[in-house]
């Protein structure tokens, strides 16, 4: 049954986007912001697809780097993000996500290499790209993504009635709509000044342009921490699941008891006693 509840803002992990043309300072700004978000520099990891640019700012501190080379498939990005999570990284910089969409081995190149019906092909490609987006959104760490911007054009009719290309501004080189998934999106100019194009935090709306710094990260971290702990759904084990556990190996039973102790799983006192007795039995075998 669907139930109403009072709205509460939970603690969150930031999903920050930085976009600019070449030379806008995306990498440098990302590292500075990360210093304010992380407890220490060794808790920051940069996934580098920009030909070694991730190592250029080693003077800023002992952050970690994963060098990601072609093919830039969604799955390779996901693998890199997972490696960072497993290492206990607090802030992951993906520099940049452009390659996943428009790089060698990225989604567009895969699409161009496929034969057959375009609609059918995209029915296969879209879920792969979405898995990459979902990995960013569900990541256990703060995530900063950088993306390239390039001049965009559209065809318009001139005074002679001929179609001619016309500049319509700078466009992010990734699949359209990615910005809407972010908490905050900052656009950098060639002087490294940032303006906000999206802001769910309310920290930057109506503010003048600024240069991102470590204090920007501290401000974002304070916003992330200013909420209640995320609500966890507690799963209650039924009799069938208990019966299955009572014939499992030691490691499986131990893991379940650990989850019960951490209140991730719920059992009746009787079931808990059964599992503890069974675990002791396995110890003696």
Image: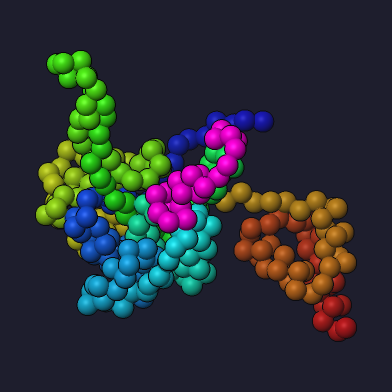
Answer whether residue 4 is visible to the viewer in this image. yes
User: Does 91 appear above or below 219?
Assistant: below
Q: Position of residue 26 (x, y in %)?
A: 25, 57
| Quadrant the C terminus occupies | bottom right
Q: Residue at x 85, y 78 (%)?
A: 282
Answer whether residue 39 is visible to the viewer in this image. no
Would residue 198 be counted in the magenta stretch?
A: no
Q: Position of residue 238 (x, y in %)?
A: 80, 51
Q: Residue at x 33, y 74 (%)?
A: 63
Please count the marks in the image: 0
| Quadrant the N terminus occupies | top right
Would residue 103 be counted in the magenta stretch?
A: yes
**Residue 208's image quarter?**
top left
**Residue 69's image quarter?**
bottom left
Q: Position of residue 243 (x, y in %)?
A: 87, 59
Q: Which residue is at the far bottom? A: 284
Q: Nearer the viewer, residue 244 or 75?
A: 75
Q: Is residue 244 left or right of residue 222?
A: right
Q: Position of residue 38 (x, y in %)?
A: 34, 67
**Residue 258's image quarter?**
bottom right
Q: Residue at x 44, y 41 (%)?
A: 8
Q: Residue at x 62, y 63 (%)?
A: 262
Q: Which residues are magenta?
A: 100-120
| Dominant SS type (magenta) | helix
Q: Nearer the viewer, residue 120 or 276?
A: 120
User: Does 11 appear above or below 275?
Assistant: above
């Amino acid at each position: 049954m669907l139930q109403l509840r009072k709205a509460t803002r939970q603690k969150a992990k930031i999903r920050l986007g930085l976009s600019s043309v070449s030379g806008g300072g995306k990498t440098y700004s990302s590292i500075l912001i990360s210093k304010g978000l992380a407890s220490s520099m060794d808790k920051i990891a940069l996934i580098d697809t920009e030909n070694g640019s991730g190592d250029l700012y080693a003077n800023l501190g002992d952050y970690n780097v994963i060098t990601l080379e072609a093919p830039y498939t969604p799955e390779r990005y996901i693998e890199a993000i997972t490696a960072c999570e497993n290492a206990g990284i607090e802030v992951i910089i993906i520099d940049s996500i452009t390659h996943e969409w428009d790089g060698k081995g990225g989604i567009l190149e895969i699409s161009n290499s496929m034969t057959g019906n375009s609609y059918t092909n995209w029915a296969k490609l879209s879920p792969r790209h979405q898995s990459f987006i979902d990995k960013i959104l569900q990541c256990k760490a703060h995530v900063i993504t950088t993306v390239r911007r390039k001049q965009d054009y559209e065809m318009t009719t001139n005074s002679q009635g001929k179609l001619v290309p016309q500049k319509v501004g700078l466009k992010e080189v990734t699949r359209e709509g990615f910005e809407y998934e972010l908490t905050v999106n900052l656009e950098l100019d060639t002087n490294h000044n940032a303006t906000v194009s999206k802001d769910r935090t309310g920290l930057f709306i109506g503010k003048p342009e600024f240069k991102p710094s470590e204090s920007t990260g501290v401000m974002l971290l304070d916003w992330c921490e200013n909420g209640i702990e995320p609500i966890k759904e507690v799963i209650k084990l039924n009799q069938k699941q208990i019966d299955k556990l009572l014939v499992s190996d030691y490691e499986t039973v131990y893991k379940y008891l650990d989850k019960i102790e951490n209140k991730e799983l719920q059992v009746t006192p009787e079931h808990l006693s059964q599992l503890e007795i069974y675990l002791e039995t396995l110890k003696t075998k």
